């Protein structure tokens, strides 16, 4: 919309309000109540300024953007850069916040800060990003901001860039109009001079603050969008372009979506979630897998014959996620060998959820702690991958005192019996040993041969269900990187083949045109010489 239609539009909207205010003011003046009622404006505005000046500021959180369930620890640490930049809004003037060039400059500076966070030792951190990834970031930020403004702010689609810049002059316009109004009031009634002085002292700063708050809110919204996608950029999740990224993020939502057009329910795509069962030798891993599978499919009560990881599939129904259980060979309680660590690493690297099985009767947890330490180091060095949640599974609780007693269910949260108190103490020992490395700790008994099964359906399966969304996120992020790596080389080949096809199509016409041009030039030269 050009300037004149916008002015006409504004006049048509504001004219009735101005007329109502003018007629109301005239009637108040004629009735003689104007003097007293006019003080209410000054008193109320002064009270508002004092409240704003001395009241504790309230942070109004912006609505969340996207899902963060797939973020890695380094991604969560980078979120602090977003908060720090949003707090800096008080350092910027209204003129800066209304200038589009300011947003361009700050975007480049922020992109460099985020790149340094992910690549602290690089000489040119931002130089590692591809042009396609940067364009994808710009596109995603622009799409989200356009959607937010169009759907949340009435009339935002009518505002032009020049009109946006004029917002920085709004307080000056307000002061001019306000001064003319008070000048007329003082001429008609000299006692209004005191009210004018009060208004000048308190209302002008309040109007400037309101202007800064409006522009500052937009800047905070812009930084929230930009920061989110800069995190996605530096984590490598934008390498496939905006369409591939949007499709992957939609798969993070496990809740069925109703299509508003035809009122049909669209089920989310099933995801393959891998659960690795690790632990020391004879900790009860295979027995636990048997209980989860519901049948005797894993070797139990013997040392592993081989050190290969065994895979088992578990599918509830055709619409549910596919669960893959990885039964690892285990490591010794005196320390893991290089081969055992290698195989455990391979299982956990490809896992979206880890069940760390520990024999409740064995106090030796050094090998388990060492494995988790090495896994933490591995994931810190590969910040693109989200570490899977680890559930501590305290097995063989039937072996706790009193040993001869087996009378489940055991309410270890509120223990009354001796065995319940021992289960509670065992879980507390595990929590203190591993601190915050475990997402949860549950007790189980998986001795199916002797009819002693407890804690699988009561505690373990509900815990897995609660962590399933996070496990889906791990799986999708890993598959996203795998697909990008696989397509990188083939994409170049396809591009070369496409260029070759275009050249093949254009070459005959191009060669024919060039031959014709040469022939015409020769003929022209020969004709000129003949003359």
Image (spheres, rainbow, N blue to C red):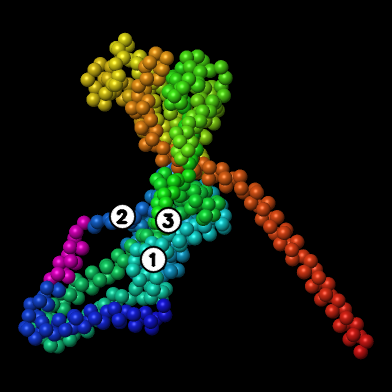
Q: Which residue is mark 2?
A: 61
Q: Nearer the viewer, mark 1 or mark 3?
A: 3
- Percent position (x, y) of residue 316? 44, 34
Q: Residue 161: x, y in percent?
A: 42, 73
Q: The N terminus is located in which quarter?
A: bottom left
Q: Earlier in the sequence, mark 2 or mark 1?
A: 2
The residue under label 1 is 150
> For residue 108: magenta?
no
Mainly helix, strand or loop, the magenta region? helix
Lower position in the chain sequence, tag 3 or tag 2: 2
Q: Give the residue at the far bottom of this rendering.
A: 531
Q: Answer yes or no: do the residues labelled 2 and 1 have beta carbons within 8 Å? A: no
Whole-number angstrom distance, CA of label 1 to CA of label 3: 24 Å
Classed neighbour count for the residue bearing mark 1: other residues with Cα under 10 Å, few (<14), some (14–19), many (≥20): some
Q: Residue at x 39, y 73 (%)?
A: 158
Span highlighted in magenta in the image? 43-56
> Could one spot residue 215 in this view of the protein?
no
Q: Secondary structure at mark 2?
A: loop
Q: Quadrant of residue 29?
A: bottom left
**Inter-mark Cα distance, 3 to 2:** 35 Å
Element at badge 3? Answer: loop
Q: In the image, what residue occupies the spot 37% across and 36% down?
A: 466
Mark 2 vs mark 1: give the one in front: 1
Residue 90 pos. (x, y %)? 32, 62
Helix, strand or loop at disc 1? helix
- For the residue pair 474 and 296, the one nearer the viewer reads as 296
380 or 22: nearer the viewer: 22
Mark 1 or mark 3: which comes first in sequence? 1
Horizontal side of 522 relative to 25 (left or right) equals right
User: Which residue is under mark 3?
Assistant: 262
Q: Position of residue 115 (x, y in %)?
A: 49, 52
Residue 29 visible in the snapshot: yes
């Amino acid at each position: 919309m050009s300037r004149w239609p916008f002015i006409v539009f504004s006049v048509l909207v504001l004219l009735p309000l101005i007329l109502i205010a003018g007629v109301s003011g005239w009637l108040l003046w004629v009735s003689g109540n104007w003097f007293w009622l006019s003080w209410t404006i000054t008193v109320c505005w002064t009270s508002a300024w004092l409240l704003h000046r001395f009241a504790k500021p309230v942070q109004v959180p912006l609505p969340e953007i996207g899902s963060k369930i797939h973020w890695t620890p380094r991604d969560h640490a980078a979120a602090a850069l977003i908060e720090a930049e949003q707090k800096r809004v008080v350092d910027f003037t209204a003129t800066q916040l209304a200038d589009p060039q300011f947003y361009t400059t700050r975007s480049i500076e922020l992109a460099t800060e985020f790149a340094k966070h992910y690549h602290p030792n690089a000489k040119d951190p931002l130089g590692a990003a591809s042009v396609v990834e940067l364009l994808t970031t710009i596109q995603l930020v622009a799409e989200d901001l356009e959607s937010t403004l169009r759907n949340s702010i009435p009339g935002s689609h009518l505002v032009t860039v020049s009109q946006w810049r004029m917002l920085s002059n709004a307080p000056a316009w307000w002061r001019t109009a306000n001064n003319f109004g008070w000048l007329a009031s003082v001429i008609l009634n000299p006692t209004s001079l005191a009210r004018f002085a009060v208004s000048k002292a308190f209302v002008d700063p309040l109007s400037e603050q309101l202007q800064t708050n409006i522009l500052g809110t937009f800047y905070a919204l812009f930084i929230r969008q930009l920061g989110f996608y800069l995190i996605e950029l530096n984590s490598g999740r934008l390498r496939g372009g905006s369409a591939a990224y949007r499709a992957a993020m939609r798969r993070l939502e496990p809740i069925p979506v109703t299509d508003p057009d035809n009122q049909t329910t669209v089920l989310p795509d099933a995801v393959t979630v891998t659960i690795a069962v690790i632990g020391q030798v004879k900790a009860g891993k295979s027995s636990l897998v048997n209980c989860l599978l519901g049948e005797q499919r894993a070797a139990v009560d013997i040392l592993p014959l081989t050190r290969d990881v065994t895979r088992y599939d578990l599918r509830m129904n055709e619409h549910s996620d596919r669960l893959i259980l990885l039964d690892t060979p285990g490591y010794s309680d005196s320390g893991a060998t290089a081969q055992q660590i290698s195989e455990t690493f391979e299982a956990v690297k490809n896992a979206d959820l880890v069940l760390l099985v520990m024999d409740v009767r064995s106090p030796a947890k050094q090998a388990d702690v060492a494995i988790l330490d090495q896994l933490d180091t591995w994931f810190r060095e590969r910040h693109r991958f989200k570490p899977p949640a680890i559930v501590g599974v305290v097995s063989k609780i039937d072996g706790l005192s009193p040993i001869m007693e087996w009378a489940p269910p055991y309410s270890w949260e509120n223990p009354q019996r001796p065995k319940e108190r021992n289960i509670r103490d065992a879980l507390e020992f595990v929590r203190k040993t591993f601190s915050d490395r475990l997402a949860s700790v549950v007790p189980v008994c998986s001795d199916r041969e002797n009819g002693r099964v407890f804690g699988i359906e009561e505690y373990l399966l509900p815990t897995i269900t609660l962590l399933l969304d996070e496990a889906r996120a791990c799986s999708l992020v890993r598959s996203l990187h795998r697909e990008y790596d696989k397509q990188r080389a083939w994409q170049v080949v396809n591009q070369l083949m496409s260029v070759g096809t275009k050249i093949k199509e254009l070459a005959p016409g191009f060669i024919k045109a060039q031959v014709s041009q040469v022939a015409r030039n020769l003929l022209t030269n020969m004709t000129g010489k003949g003359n």
